[in-house]
Amino acid sequence: MSHEKKALFIIFGGTGDLAKRKLYPSLFRLFRKGSINKHFAVIGTARREWSDDYFREVVTDSIQSLKPSQQELADFISHFYYQSHNVNDTEEYKILGNLANELDSTYELEGNRLFYLAMAPRFFGTISKHIKSEKIMTEHGFSRLVIEKPFGTDFETAQQLNSEIAAVFNEDQIFRIDHYLGKEMIQNISAVRFGNNIFESLWNHRYIDNVQITLAEDLGVEERGGYYDQSGALKDMVQNHILQVVALLAMEPPTLFSEEAIRTEKITALKAIRVYNDQEVKENFVRGQYVAGKTADTNYKEEPGVDENSQTETFVAGKLMIDNFRWAGVPFYIRTGKRLSEKGTRINIVFKSTPINVFREADTSHKDLPDNILTIYIQPTEGFSLTLNGKEVGDGFNIDPVKLNYRHSQENLDNSPEAYEKLLLDCLKGDATNFTHWDEVANSWKIVDTVRETWDKETTDIPTYPAGSMGPHCAFDLLEKDNRQWVWEPDSWDK
Ligand SMILES: NC(=O)C1=CN([C@@H]2O[C@H](COP(=O)(O)OP(=O)(O)OC[C@H]3O[C@@H](n4cnc5c(N)ncnc54)[C@H](OP(=O)(O)O)[C@@H]3O)[C@@H](O)[C@H]2O)C=CC1
Ligand SMILES: O=C1O[C@H](COP(=O)(O)O)[C@@H](O)[C@H](O)[C@H]1O
């Protein structure tokens, strides 16, 4: 049976960075695999006055790294059409609707439409409203809305945005993208937890001492200074990606690996994360801003688009507490930042020590036994490691911590679908497991809003850290005051 999906993709913001860097290459990968084939069409739309031919040249450039054959390329780009359109102009939606109907009939798309809003969120409400009022949604086939982050700038604006969208689309038609949920090793969290009794039976406060999540980036804000300076690391990374990872790590086992069961458990986990008051925010969250250092000679404040007096954080670290039976007393330490020493996304599960150290006299070098740590490597390498204590070979009885290490091979990585490709295919299938439900977004905002509000009242200058370090001192102090430290080694796996 053919696994071809039939659909019209209408990409709002079709001339933008996201469309070129992520969406067109992902569509090409789906085309190459046959997930979309004869029965699909793409309308790119934005204000620029492009022709179909020019649009097809842009799409061609965007997929060069995938080395399409001439035949593949010609077939693929023949499905692309461009319509110049200002989303604030009601009349222009009529032209868009006519083109959509025409393509529906030419490519026999059965009324299936996927509206991808690759644009600033301030436009989401007006686009949704016009999609309905100008009858661009069909009455047969599916109509799905894919929206990008940021979903609002706080709980209130997110709620407003949600009600504008919900006036047109039902929750099951809305696909809120969080590209971390499309990453192979983020999806693997559930496999590790629920596929291995050795872990699931230990996955609680009795055996886990603390959990650490690091999303480190070596790059700075690049060309996105204007956006980033309004957002900062807390809203850019914690409200969405990090809290989604926390939810996957902390949730109760679903009764079945289904969209509904997983979503229910994730929402319950997010609701159990403690919402801090002012004083608790000060004790449990720290931030920083990069300045020139060994990997860059520019201060954040001098980046294009950034205010020269900016107090925006490019780094945040925090301690989350989850108030339920499973996680009572177990801190979830999180941190993320730009211009850190390397690009590295890791989860470390640090297990509790044995009740007593029976080797304390035999091996004086290990008066405290090294921790057992399960590390999940998300990127750049993908895999797991588990540190175990064994006996050093030879006389005497010294403890030798060994690391069981596994990484996906380069071949596996090359063949594995990119996050956006997976998520687009999920949208075509109508599977929202790896998308964020409104209740998840709402709870995440409630958690970060109190942090932001406390920081907004601060009168002292934001702490700084040099580019190429792992963040400001206060991020290390945060764990030291709990007698713990960040687990971090350069990701030097040899393939
Ligand atoms: N780029 C990335 O890596 C990521 C982006 N995102 C999110 O994706 C969205 C898009 O980001 P990105 O592609 O970087 O942004 P860009 O600024 O590159 O693109 C914005 C697009 O919107 C179009 N546009 C702007 N105003 C109008 C208008 N009035 N009518 C019609 N089209 C308009 C622009 O085209 P024109 O000027 O021709 O009208 C352009 O195609 C944002 O929400 C961003 O936060 C999320 C994660 C990563
Ligand atoms: O959503 C975002 O994510 C990227 C980091 O994504 P990754 O897949 O490269 O880890 C981040 O650079 C960007 O600021 C943020 O908006």
Image: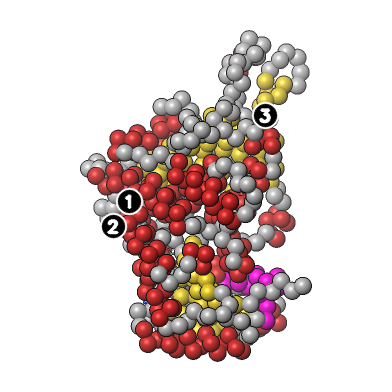
Marks 1/2: CA–CA distance: 9 Å
Instruction: Identify the mark at residue 388; answer none if there is no mark.
Output: 3
Q: Do the residues labelled 1 and 2 touch (CB within 8 Å)?
A: yes
The residue stretch that appears in magenta: 24-38
Which label lies toward us, 3 or 2?
Answer: 3
Membership of 26 in magenta stretch: yes
> Label 3 to label 2, Cα distance in Å?
48 Å
* Local SS, label 3: strand
Please state the horizontal and vertical placement of residue 141, each as a whole percent of the image.
58, 77
Q: Is residue 260 something that shows in the picture?
A: yes
Q: Is the magenta stretch mostly helix, strand or loop?
A: helix
- SS assignment at label 1: loop
Residue in view at x 52 percent, y 80 percent: 138
Q: Earlier in the sequence, mark 1 or mark 2?
A: 2
Q: Is residue 311 above or below residue 158?
A: above
Q: How many labels does the image show?
A: 3
Of callouts 3 and 2, the N-terminal one = 2
Q: Which residue position is annotated with label 1?
A: 312
Q: Which amino acid does label 3 sit on?
A: Leu
Residue shown at 59%/23% (left/top)?
Answer: 353
Looking at the rendered structure, the secondary structure element under dot 2 is loop
> Farthest top residue?
361
Give the quadrant of residue 93. Answer: bottom left
Q: Is residue 156 magenta?
A: no
Q: Which amino acid does label 2 sit on?
A: Asp
Q: Nearer the viewer, residue 190 or 430?
A: 430
The correct choice, above or below, for 42 with respect to 396 in the image is below
**Sequence-wise first label, 1 or 3:** 1
